[in-house]
Image: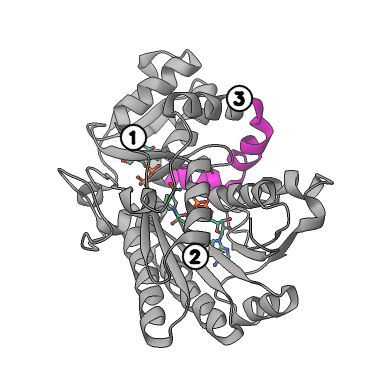
Amino acid sequence: MSSSKTVLVTGGAGFIGSNYCRYVLKNHPDYRVVALDALTYAGNLSTMADMQNNPETAPRFKFYPGKIQDETVVNGIIKAEKIDFIVNFAAESHNDRSILDPGSFIQTDVYGVFTLLDAVRRHGVERMCHISTDEVYGTIDDGQFTESSPIEPNTPYSASKAGGELQVRAHRITYGTPTVITRCGNNFGPFQYPEKLIPFFVSRLIDYKKVPLYGSGQQVRDWVYVMDHCSGIDHVLHYGVTGEAYNIGSDCEKPNIDITHRLLKLLDRPESLIKQIGDPRGGAHDKRYSIDASKLKSIGWKPAYNFEEALESTVRWYLDNQSWWRDITATSDYQQFVASFYGKYLGEDL
Ligand code: NAD
Ligand code: TYD
């Protein structure tokens, strides 16, 4: 494609960030990838090990531990590595944790974004792609969100993501900072931390544990396979119009109960493992997300994966890579979170 570039991927030890590092190393053989990650509970060195240990990718991949809100770290990396592009995935990303501890979300998802924007401006970085979410739009009963839908977030997580986006917008308008924004639906795929719906349920079902379905299970999410999200981000990074936001979606709306039944079927587990519980999110539980991605499609992107096949291969990945997620589910942080969030709902089924 284009000439050689060095891409700083923040949050590169997390789910989507690590998959994006893989995507760039594979699809841009002349690019270097520099990952920056604070290695919070959600970021793991094991998630990047394949890229660091593969002799074909290792010379083009480098990892720095650190926080995006640490300006010394961020400015130092941009200078030392001669960064051309920044793709910002670093975030506190789980709605349920944002209900327990909203403050940490503002630190990373708002202040951290400001730090990156400030560094982009100082160092003349060519472009920053900020990874946002469809959740900034809030919930929609009918129709689909377009990029001009109002920003109406309902949870501390989505409000912090909206705050980060507004920093991006303001820097673009005030300083002319070269930015683009993406907003994607719910992702699934390999290396997703086992607290989100699909990997949480798969890891529990593998062990014949009950899965807590919130409320009616009728809430609808617009699912996107992670590698389609990565190709969409890469398309926006290279071909998006500066200052614009792009939805990324593959028209795949499913209620949570339907996802749960599919997982039971793929793993050959009985219906009795579903435990319908009260709704821990209460009024903050968004009923439906639905994304119109025609703006991105109009500049040449389209999703490549079939939902059923991608879900099956994701379940297969969790069956084949049990040491990756069992190392996580064995940590005290994970066990404390699950006990404190689900204890009163699951009781002896915890
Ligand atoms: P994740 O929680 O798996 O990964 C986040 C990564 O960021 C982790 O490796 C963590 O250690 C790192 N991190 C957290 N705080 C940091 C900080 N202050 N400095 C540096 N690194 C830090 O999340 P994910 O699911 O991979 O999501 C990545 C991005 O995509 C997020 O910005 C999220 O809002 C967005 N997004 C996610 C989804 C989804 O379905 N998962 C959908 C749309 C958008
Ligand atoms: P989640 O994966 O946390 O993503 P998000 O909050 O960003 O949509 O949740 C997806 C849906 O699944 C959401 O409607 C809440 C529901 N859910 C459950 O029913 N049980 C669970 O244990 C989890 C984690 C989620």
What segment is highlighted magenta in the picture? 319-340
Among the two numbered marks 3 and 2 on one chain, the one whose residue lies closer to the N terminus: 2
> Hey, what amino acid is under mark 2?
Cys
Q: What is the x, y in percent for residue 249? A: 37, 44
The answer to which quarter of the image holds residue 343 is: top left
Magenta stretch, overall SS? helix
Kindly state the secondary structure of the residue where label 3 is placed: helix
Q: Earlier in the sequence, mark 1 or mark 3?
A: 1
| Mark 3 lies on residue | 319
Q: Please provide percent x and percent y for residue 137.
A: 26, 57
Q: For label 3, count other residues whose C-alpha is less than 10 Å away and answer few (under 14), some (14-19) or many (20+).
A: some
Residue 129: numbered disc: 2
Q: Quadrant of residue 148?
A: bottom left
**Distance in Å between CA atoms under marks 1 and 2:** 24 Å
Q: Contact, CB < 8 Å: mark 3 with mark 2? A: no
Magenta span contains residue 237: no
Instruction: Assess whether mark 2 and mark 1 are in contact (beta carbons under 8 angstroms).
Output: no
Residue type at mark 1 is Cys
How far apart, in angstroms, are the residues tagged by discs 3 and 2? 33 Å
Q: Is residue 107 left or right of residue 58?
A: left
